Amino acid sequence: MFEFIRSIYVVVLFVLLEALAVSYYAHATCYTQARLLARSNQVAGGVHGLLAGIRRYFLLGDENRALLAYAAELKERLARYEEAESIAGFDTALAEIGESKYRVMNASVISNTLNRAQNLIVLNRGTRDGVVADMAVVSPDGAMVGYVVDCTERYAVALSVLNTSFRASGKLADSDYFGSVYWDGVDPDVVTLGELSKYSEPQPGQAVVSAGFSQYFPAGVKIGVVESAVLNPTRTSYTARVRLTARIARLTDVLLVENRDLYEIRDLENSEKVKQHTRQK
């Protein structure tokens, strides 16, 4: 043992001295601290990108199957449109619709936390790609994931559905009963649909989709399926446990959806005339 230590003590001493030198340099001035912080952030971003690339490689099989299923669905929709094209006035009706109120683009996941109360998702798209705050984030098969809260030129950060600050409107599919979707910070595969009417009677296996009242998500975005539901003590509303459709832990790619009308609606809500009618007298 002594011989082994003696054979490597020069290397160990060199490493210790280098560590001391770097530590002294790092704390010498504010400038050196800033440079080292910037360099460490750059290295951390590169490592996250490398790990994300490796993870995407091993999940290519699942992604390809999901893409094939989505392509099949799109082909079916296209066939219906082509069939309807023979109807008189169909082309005119499409022209009158004009540009869709939603804009969609793809992005890859750089990092994605799961073990915190305030989980975030970092994406490889930014303002130079047309990303803006408040864009909805959905999985490739159209399930709710989160929404963008901030972005730089090359990257964006989204608030995950697995964040205790996340809120969205959801409803029981094929019904008019809606409530608030949020995460209680416990199970990363389950969210809560609260404030459901006492007349809704949610059943296990019943699908839950976005209600369309949220400014982030279009109506009908898949959220999950009901696992169980209970009436509150006053028997005035249900609280349902909903198993998420999106597999948040395995996300490699997502879709970003922008509501083109969002800012016009917000400007109207914050207009002076509206404020005149909402001020407390």
Image (cartoon, rainbow, N blue to C red):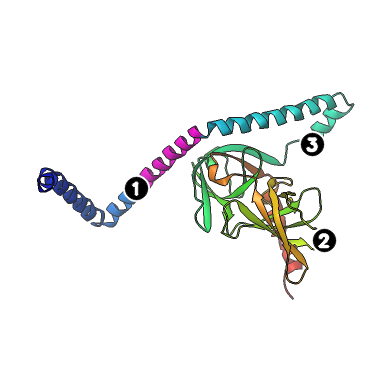
Asked if residue 135 shows in the view, the reply is no
Q: Is residue 229 magenta?
A: no
Say whether disc 3 or disc 1 marks the residue closer to the N-terminus.
1
Q: Is residue 9 above or below residue 91?
A: below
Sequence-wise, the earlier of marks 3 and 2 is 3
Q: Specify the farthest residue to the bottom.
A: 281
Q: Name the disc covering residue 199, or none.
A: 2
Give the extent of the magenta segment.
40-58
**Of label 2 and label 1, which has the lower sequence position?**
1
User: Could you tell me which quadrant the C terminus lies in?
Assistant: bottom right
The residue nearer to you, when weighing 155 against 252, is 252
* Rendered location of residue 176, percent (x, y): 81, 53
Q: Which residue is mark 1?
A: 40
Q: Are marks 2 and 1 in contact (CB under 8 Å)?
A: no
Res 55 visible: yes
Marks 2 and 1: which is nearer the front?
2
The answer to whether residue 66 is above or below residue 127 is above
Q: Residue furthest right?
A: 88
Question: Residue 112: which numbered mark, if any?
Answer: none
Tell me the residue at 69%/52% (across/down): 215
Q: Which residue is mark 3?
A: 97
Inter-mark Cα distance, 2 to 1 = 55 Å
Q: Amino acid at mark 3?
A: Ile
